[in-house]
């Protein structure tokens, strides 16, 4: 029997909110983007770091409503952090989130039986439902015929055929949503569960304000799962005691697990009887034929290697013109602002601290966009699931699963989205282990370090019939993190995160042509997140490091160089610029940061480093890429980049006090290995803390990676010297 939704839900604060729910790979995101366009806000759900996407939609007779895109889930039995958030939002117990007035469920028409499982559960939450029968073109191509009118009659909720990628059926869907909100009627329960069970559940629900029958049912059936735990915590000990007593009474009459699975699928079969005609349910599809090649143990790995080669080729070469343009833009901006600010601390803070710091991060935006363009294309076409399957065979021996693949791949651009991508991993120990090894992947920020030292010290010659030695060195550095991550993950899963390996269960979606809008939105949102990072943590950390490098100011040094400027008045501009650069280098040496560099020189000397390299490593703690600018200041060169010939020449000619060269191949390799393994990114550490809710994990990450980096740099330098490269 249909029931009215509560006044609280009807009069929720602010605009009407419609939740968008569906299984993964149903085209939910494509439909959400089609309905909302660019009128979306992306942030985090209150109190957690799970992504929250909300968009604006105008409905006839209702007006503006908010569409809340919830994380994909196969059922309301929540396990992963994403699923828990989706279920809590639907049940109205997510702290700080407004109530939901209706639910838009996105179904895959080509796999309707599996998709109706969550529908049977949603029918029990006392919320108006509208079902969007998406991917109907795929179903039609397979000869599947679905009677949407019959399903509407049997389910008691509107079932609207749509093709989100072609924007077909959207007006009918909006009309159905408008009617559902206007009537405010929740549908009848599915009938999948026994009536005596509902009688017991209703008794408990009536005892607690805000505890709907659907909410009580989830707490009863899901038992110790994360979603049920949230419900029990919300309503207190008395509620938990009633649930335990109810579980005892119900188990005396049957098995909860069988009712939750077998009874629901039996109900689904009854609903689909006559409404779904599939002449060849066990057919071999085009996707099946492609998978014979793309998931083959040998052919699949070769194909995956080719795809990754294309991705990295694009990241490291296609982005260069755009990066050069951004670099020039920030340089021009700094010069322009310098003309309006007097010389001194304020000008240096704004130009050298804020503008240079943010510019040093924003310059990698093209690489971030290109990476997420490829990730979006591979995910939307269906290949990413196959790549995860292939990687599961390689990751299982070290204690991880194929679900760790996408977070680790994302970390090659930036560890922040990589860490955030672990939210989809169900097992909490696997999730934390993946977070802790993700920063070992060589992100874009390490590329300037590699570029300057490879260009300066690795010979530009070919070996082995055409392979460039510099390119092989770069490839080897990217492999270092991957190789080291394997034993680190294995040790973590055998010690701190010990537990039974979680089973790897992954749906293989059908291959399809990627939706341009969905991929474009993915790139846009990723770019915006990256820029927000540049404008917050990186900016703050960069200004702190600027202060350490700027203060205290030596009046003696200032007076000396002022006298030099007076003496050289009228000299060519190049001479005055060189004088200014030498003054900056002298000021840096006696700054707080310079003093710290001298203090740690005994520690870094076994790595082949002097105080200047040690200071540059300290200065690059907020973000690795700032080491290039720091080296330029240390060697009195002014503004430089990783392609600077003057910086490379300065590195080659730098000497110790006894006249020996500071830099050689072993030292250069030592520095690059150190930066390949160290955790010099305060933003990544902060994100790990937010994702885990504890400081122990980012502290552990920083400690173990710093130790690994030191050992790796020490071994690299000593081996290089022993071989005779020094």
Image (cartoon, rainbow, N blue to C red):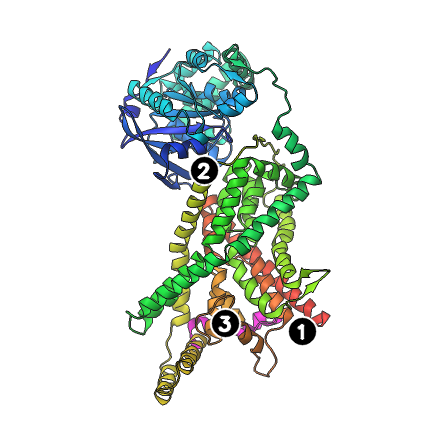
Q: Is residue 73 magenta?
A: no
Query: In the depicted view, which residue is nearer to us: 701 or 293?
Result: 293
Helix, strand or loop for disc 2 = helix
CA gap, disc 3 and disc 2 = 48 Å
* Left/right of residue 311 with respect to residue 328 in the rendered view: right
Q: Mark 1 — residue?
A: 726
Residue 645 spot, x, y in % from top left = 53, 72
Q: Mark 2 — residue?
A: 518
Disc nearer the start of the sequence (1/3): 3
Q: Quadrant of residue 670?
A: bottom right
Residue 702 spot, x, y in % from top left = 53, 56
Viewer-side label of 3, 2: 2
Query: In the depicted view, which residue is nearer to us: 88 or 57?
Result: 57
Q: For the magenta stretch, what is the residue range?
A: 590-611
Q: Mark 3 — residue?
A: 597
Viewer-side label of 1, 3: 1
Q: Quadrant of residue 292?
A: top right
Query: In the depicted view, which residue is nearer to us: 432 or 45?
Result: 45
* Left/right of residue 527 with respect to residue 477 in the rendered view: left
């Amino acid at each position: 029997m249909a029931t009215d939704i509560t006044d609280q839900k009807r009069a929720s604060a602010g605009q009407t909110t419609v939740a968008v729910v569906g299984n993964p790979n149903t085209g939910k995101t494509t439909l959400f983007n089609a309905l909302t366009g660019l009128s979306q806000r992306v942030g985090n759900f209150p109190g957690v770091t799970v992504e929250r996407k909300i968009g604006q939609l105008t409905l006839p007779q209702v007006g503006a409503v908010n569409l809340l895109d919830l994380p994909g889930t196969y059922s309301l039995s929540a396990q992963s952090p994403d699923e828990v958030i989706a279920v809590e939002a639907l049940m109205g117990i997510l702290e700080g989130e407004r109530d939901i007035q209706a639910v838009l469920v996105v179904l895959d028409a080509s796999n309707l039986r599996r998709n109706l499982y969550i529908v049977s559960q949603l029918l029990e939450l006392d919320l108006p439902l509208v079902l969007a029968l998406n991917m109907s073109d795929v179903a039609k191509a397979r000869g599947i015929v679905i009677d949407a009118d019959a399903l509407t009659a049997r389910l008691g909720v509107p079932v609207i055929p749509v093709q989100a990628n072609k924007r077909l059926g959207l007006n009918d869907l909006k009309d159905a949503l408008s009617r559902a909100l206007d009537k405010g009627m929740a549908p009848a329960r599915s009938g999948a569960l026994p009536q005596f069970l509902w009688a017991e559940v209703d008794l408990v629900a009536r005892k607690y304000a805000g505890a709907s029958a659907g909410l009580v049912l989830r707490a009863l059936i899901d038992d110790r799962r994360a979603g049920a735990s949230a419900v029990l915590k919300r309503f207190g000990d008395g509620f938990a005691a009633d649930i335990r007593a109810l579980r005892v009474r119900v188990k005396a009459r049957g098995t909860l697990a069988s009712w939750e699975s077998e009874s629901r699928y039996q109900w689904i079969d009854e609903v689909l009887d006559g409404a779904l005609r599939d002449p060849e349910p066990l057919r071999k599809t085009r996707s099946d034929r492609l998978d014979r090649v793309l998931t083959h143990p040998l052919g699949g790995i070769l194909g995956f290697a080719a795809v990754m080669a294309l991705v990295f080729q694009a990241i490291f070469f296609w982005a260069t013109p755009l990066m050069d343009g951004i670099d020039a833009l920030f340089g021009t901006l700094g010069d322009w602002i310098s003309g309006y600010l007097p010389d001194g601390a304020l000008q240096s803070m704004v130009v050298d601290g804020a503008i240079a710091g943010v510019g040093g991060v924003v310059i990698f935006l093209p690489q971030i966009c290109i990476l997420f363009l490829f990730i979006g294309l591979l995910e939307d076409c269906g290949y990413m699931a196959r790549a995860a399957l292939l990687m599961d065979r390689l990751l299982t021996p070290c204690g991880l699963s194929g679900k760790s693949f996408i977070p680790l791949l994302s970390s090659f651009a930036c560890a922040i989205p990589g860490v955030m991508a672990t939210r989809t991993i169900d097992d909490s120990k696997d999730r934390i282990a993946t977070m802790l090894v993700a920063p070992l992947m060589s992100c874009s920020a390490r590329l300037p370090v590699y570029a300057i030292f490879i260009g300066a010290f690795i010979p530009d010659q070919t070996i082995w019939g055409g392979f460039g030695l510099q390119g092989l060195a770069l490839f080897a550095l990217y492999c270092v993190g991957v190789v080291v991550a394997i034993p680190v993950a294995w040790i973590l899963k055998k010690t701190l995160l010990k537990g039974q390996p979680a089973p790897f269960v992954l749906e293989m979606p059908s291959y399809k042509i990627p939706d341009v809008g969905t991929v474009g939105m993915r790139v846009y949102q990723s770019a915006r997140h990256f820029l927000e990072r540049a404008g917050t943590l990186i900016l703050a950390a960069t200004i702190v490091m600027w202060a350490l490098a700027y203060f205290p100011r030596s009046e003696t040094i200032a007076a000396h160089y002022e006298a030099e400027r007076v003496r050289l008045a009228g000299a060519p501009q190049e001479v005055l610029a060189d004088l200014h650069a030498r003054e900056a280098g002298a000021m840096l040496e006696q700054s707080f940061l310079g003093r710290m560099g001298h203090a740690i020189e005994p520690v870094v000397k076994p790595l082949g480093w002097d105080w200047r390299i040690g200071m540059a490593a300290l200065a690059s703690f907020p973000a690795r890429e700032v080491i290039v600018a720091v080296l330029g200041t240390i060697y009195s060169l002014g503004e430089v980049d990783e392609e600077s010939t003057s910086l490379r020449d300065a590195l080659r000619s730098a000497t110790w006090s006894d006249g020996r060269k500071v830099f050689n191949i072993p030292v250069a390799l030592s520095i690059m290995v150190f930066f390949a393994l160290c955790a010099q990114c305060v933003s990544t550490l902060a994100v790990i803390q937010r994702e885990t809710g504890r400081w122990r994990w980012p502290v552990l990450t920083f400690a173990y990676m710093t130790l690994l980096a030191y050992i790796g740099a020490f071994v690299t330098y000593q081996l290089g010297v022993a071989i005779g490269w020094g």
